[in-house]
Image: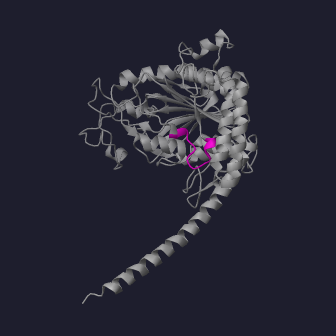
Amino acid sequence: MINLQQIQQNNLRRIFLGDSIRGIGSVALGAMMAGDSARAASNSDASVDQSNSSSNGLPHFKPTAKRVLCLFQSGGLSHIDLFDDKPMLHKFAGQEIPASIKGTQRLTGMTSGQSAYPIVPPLKSGKKCGKSGAWISDLLPNMQTIADDVTFIKTLNTEAINHDPAITFMNTGNQLPGYASMGAWVSYGLGTENENLPAFIAMVSQGTGKNPGQPVFSRLWGSGFLPSSHQGVGLRPGANPVLYLKNPPGVAAHQRRELLDDLSELNRLRADDQGDPEILTRIHSYEMAFRMQTSVPELTDISSESQATLDAYGPEVNKAGSYAANCLLARRLLERDVRFVQLFHRGWDQHIAIAKQLPNQCRDIDQPTTALLKDLKRLGMLDDTLVVFATEFGRTVFSQGKLGDPGMGRDHHGRCFSVWMAGGGIKGGLEHGLTDDFCYNILEKPVHLRDLHATILHCLGIDHSSFSFKFRGLNTRLTGVEEAHVVKDILV
């Protein structure tokens, strides 16, 4: 016979015990979160009130660079066509890539089902340039002239083979969204030297290669788990570079100032009561926006630039939002001591029609990139500005699609690809690393993208292994938990 009273008592006992356990857990969780909040508030407060200094006791040692410029070529630039020609590519042109070279590593779904993988040499001839004899394609004739100012890393590699994980990995040190970007880490570690502009600014342009290119999301310059005052600010083309910056009609500057003063006082009272670091970040954001009402229009007004300078950047320098225009704005930002400037140029994803798309894409970036580097050098800024010309992965030596077809392209290739660095403590006129005869595998001196991140931080005076932020109970770093090494061979 079922004893209903006993069942009810057992159920009540279970509910009581469950609620008690959950209550204890909630108290413990609340205490942990309060501790994390207090620590984050302390860090965030330092970033607001001491914006010219680091909240982490940084730099660890004397830096060679004060600021970073990252020229990110979004979509996967073809190292085969632009920077890494080999005689065997021409000898075996049109023939199947040897099985010993191709190996068994996975391919994307776009080429994994192909019945043949014929070798395709660079689409255009090139020449050896500078002291190092670095091969640079004739698609980049202006860039050929700066070979002695840059170091080519020929053996960068990544595990990611698809765009979103790869571009996220390159920009945040993790293939999963939600992690802090390079620029946010640098802002968090070193603060800013310009009180009227953000420490980290990003700009996006669309190329004439693949149009539209792969999407570029704002989380690539986001702060992730770091205080949001360190996230990048995106500059838009046109008359309104930052949304909601202008005062609405009928609101004068002094009225805005009075409003912000009152709002700041209320927010500080709330921050003292709650210990929430994002309240302090809100104060910082309001104050920065107020100062940017003056600094941004002055930044984007290029009327003071000489005609010779404008001509150097190319015919699209006056076209708002173009890569050339963004390069000139990047130089102006660096002049104003913005700590981290990043340009994203879309359109490098040449799966199809590479013979048509790649020359157009190269034409977009060749003259402005070269002009920017020469401009920094002319102004004496290259010595303490680290320039990184990067992409998320390279392209395959074999064709995607039928060989010789107008629609032929190249697939993704993360096993080895080429980037270059210049200025800010980097040697000039150097090639680092060696790929095999088919530019498919690494023979000497591999550089993982974590090593690239470690090297960027090193140039800024930061020891990557000692630079972390408490997140989900872990000391999280830009370089992750696996080994990362500074590429010392390329440093002055």
Q: Is residue 383 above or below residue 112?
A: above
Q: In terms of image quadrants, where is residue 265?
A: top right
Q: Quadrant of the C terminus?
A: top right
Q: On the rendered structure, is 486 left or right of 211?
A: right
Q: In terms of image quadrants, where is residue 118?
A: top left
- Tell me the colour scheme of the image: one colour
Q: In this view, does 316 lie above or below 401?
A: above
Q: On the rendered structure, is 491 left or right of 315?
A: right
Q: Residue 190 at what x, y percent from top left?
A: 70, 43
Indicate yes or no whether the magenta region holds residue 229: yes
Q: Which of 413 and 225 is in front in this view?
A: 225
Q: On the rendered structure, is 181 left or right of 270?
A: left
Q: Residue 294 at what x, y percent from top left?
A: 69, 24
- Residue sitting at 55 percent across and 47 percent down? 224
- Residue 381 visible within the image: no
Q: On the rendered structure, is 20 left or right of 146?
A: left
Indicate yes or no whether the magenta region holds residue 244: no
Q: Nearer the viewer, residue 89 or 280?
A: 280
- Residue 129 visible within the image: yes
Q: Which residue is outermost to the top? A: 307
Numbered circles on residues, count: 0
Q: Which of 133 and 486 is in front in this view?
A: 486
Q: Nearer the viewer, residue 346 or 230?
A: 230
* Residue numbers of the magenta segment: 219-230
Q: Which residue is outermost to the bottom? A: 1
- Residue sitting at 69 percent across and 13 percent down? 304
Q: Is residue 307 above or below residue 390?
A: above
Q: Residue 52 at what x, y percent from top left?
A: 76, 40
Q: Quadrant of the N terminus?
A: bottom left
Q: Which residue is outermost to the front? A: 5
Q: Residue 363 at what x, y percent from top left?
A: 48, 19
